[in-house]
């Protein structure tokens, strides 16, 4: 705990929020801090290296050889990240991003739960197996420093480390969450992402609206028409076939179980204004909309002056940043191509449309659980939590999962973590529920012991 608190004090902003990260040195400080703590633990045979590819953020790798009595010859990869989101304003009284505070069984501070605890939990789990006389296969702990920027450096490092990793039989990711603190939650799918800037222009320069309003279409109106090609404005359903996918029956079944376990979760989790209605009254449908159905949000705009400075002008252009969440099994590049076609084909009024700054990332759908892992999860449910484990998709992305699944298609995945419904990741008052983090760590230790016996 003291070392985790010191980690919170390091303003290790992800590169997307600190363009000068190489000179500010905070990412390097985070890496050095974890390396120092792990080195002091003296885990038998552990080899620690800091990987630095040119122009890329650093990566900490901890390679721990298998215990002597382990029968599994594969590698278990334990993943976390050390980069952080910005501080943001609005922390509660007595709390702040870079000063750790323990209060009511929680550790408050940026990076406490997302994802600073992960490296400490992974090493502690390995130590616990050894102390309890259990066994573990070869374990490689991988802590990156660009996850909050979309993990742009991770593919290069996976290529760089491919020979050293060998055959990965189990992936344990501690960067996901839990819908409650009563049980272990597994993330079994992650949505993908497609984002573009779309600019519509009809004029070379702005014109007084009293002189041109009417004869010339508004660029905003044309954009509204284009958006209607993408999304049903009444229901929010995405119209493009390439952005939709059939939901596997097993995912529907496990989601139904989760919905029954946490009824009313969406109203409890979301900061809804009074009187706001959700897009469905069906609990199962709400979860599926967040995990397996595509969704669109306009996340940015340009060409629109602040209302206080807005004049009576027919503006020359309007730009919107469109962000699509994609079903886990949708090909993000094909989705991006379909979005671009819809925005640029047969444009109303002959308006000029430019699509720029495209970004795409595939989602991920977990493989079927192996019998040994199902049994391990039952043990965790009985011995650690006293409640059955549950599985649920997550509406966001962890790019690392898809990359690893492609590289190691036979691997089993345990994507879990301590990010509970009130952890406030990415926003003010981020906190780690310490009792739950302990239980997650114990669960990982049991899974490591069982994995060592799997053939």
Image: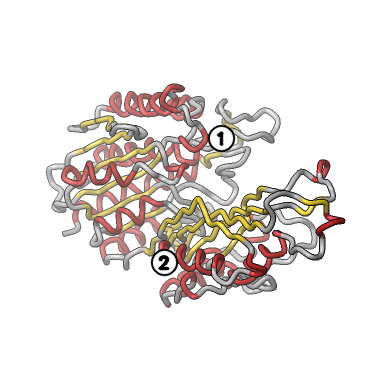
- Find residue 8 and name its label: none
Looking at the image, do the residues carrying marks 2 and 1 touch, with CB atoms under 8 Å apart? Answer: no
Q: Residue at x 27, y 54 (%)?
A: 170
Quick check: 129 above or below 225? above
Q: Quadrant of residue 226?
A: bottom right
Residue 383, given in percent of the width and then of the height, sits at 38, 54
Q: Residue at x 36, y 63 (%)?
A: 366
Closer-to-camera residue (381/223): 223
Task: Label 2, secondary structure: give it.
Answer: helix
Closer-to-camera residue (90/42): 90
Residue 162, given in percent of the width and then of the height, sits at 20, 46
Q: Quadrant of the N terminus?
A: top left
| Relative horizontal placement of residue 86, taking residue 384 as reference (left or right) | right
Residue 303, given in percent of the width and then of the height, sits at 69, 48
- Find residue 334 and name its label: 2
Instruction: State whether residue 114 appears in this view.
Output: yes
Q: Quadrant of residue 141?
A: top left
């Amino acid at each position: 705990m003291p070392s985790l608190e010191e980690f919170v004090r390091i303003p290790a902003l992800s590169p997307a929020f600190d363009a000068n990260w190489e000179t500010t040195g905070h990412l390097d400080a985070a890496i050095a801090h974890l390396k120092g703590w792990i080195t002091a633990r003296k885990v038998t045979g552990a080899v620690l290296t800091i990987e630095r590819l040119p122009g890329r953020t650093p990566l900490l790798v901890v390679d721990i050889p298998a215990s002597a009595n382990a029968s599994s010859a594969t590698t278990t990869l334990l993943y976390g990240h050390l980069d952080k989101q910005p501080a943001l304003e609005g922390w509660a009284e007595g709390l702040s991003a870079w000063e750790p505070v323990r209060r009511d069984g929680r550790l408050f501070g940026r990076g406490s739960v997302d994802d600073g605890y992960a490296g400490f939990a992974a090493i502690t789990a390995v130590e616990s197996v050894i102390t309890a006389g259990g066994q573990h296969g070869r374990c490689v702990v991988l802590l990156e420093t660009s996850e909050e920027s979309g993990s742009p450096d991770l593919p290069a490092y996976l290529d760089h480390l491919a020979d050293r990793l060998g055959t990965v039989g189990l992936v344990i990711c501690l960067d996901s969450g839990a819908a409650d603190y009563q049980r272990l939650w597994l993330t079994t799918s992650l949505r993908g992402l497609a984002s573009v800037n779309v600019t519509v222009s009809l004029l070379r320069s702005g014109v007084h609206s009293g002189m041109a309003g009417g004869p010339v279409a508004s660029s905003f109106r044309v954009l509204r028409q284009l958006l209607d090609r993408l999304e049903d404005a009444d229901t929010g359903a995405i119209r493009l076939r390439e952005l939709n996918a059939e939901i596997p029956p097993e995912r529907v079944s496990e989601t139904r179980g989760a919905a029954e376990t946490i009824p009313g979760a969406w109203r409890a989790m979301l900061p809804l204004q009074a009187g706001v209605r959700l897009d469905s009254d069906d609990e199962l449908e709400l979860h599926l909309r967040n995990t397996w159905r595509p969704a669109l949000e306009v996340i940015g705009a340009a060409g629109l002056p602040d209302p206080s400075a807005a004049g009576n002008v027919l503006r020359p252009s309007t730009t919107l940043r469109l962000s699509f969440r994609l079903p886990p099994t949708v090909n993000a590049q094909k989705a991006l191509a379909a979005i671009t076609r819809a925005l640029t084909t047969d444009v109303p009024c002959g308006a000029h449309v430019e699509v720029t700054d495209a970004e795409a990332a595939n989602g991920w759908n977990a493989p079927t659980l192996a019998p040994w892992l199902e049994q391990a999860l039952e043990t965790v449910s009985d011995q650690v939590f006293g409640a059955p484990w549950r599985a649920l998709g997550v509406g966001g992305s962890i790019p690392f999962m898809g990359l690893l699944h492609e590289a190691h298609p036979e691997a089993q995945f345990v994507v879990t973590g301590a990010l509970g419904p009130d952890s406030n990741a990415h926003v003010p008052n981020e906190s780690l529920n310490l009792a739950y983090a302990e239980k997650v760590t114990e669960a990982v230790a049991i899974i490591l012991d069982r994995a060592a016996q799997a053939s």
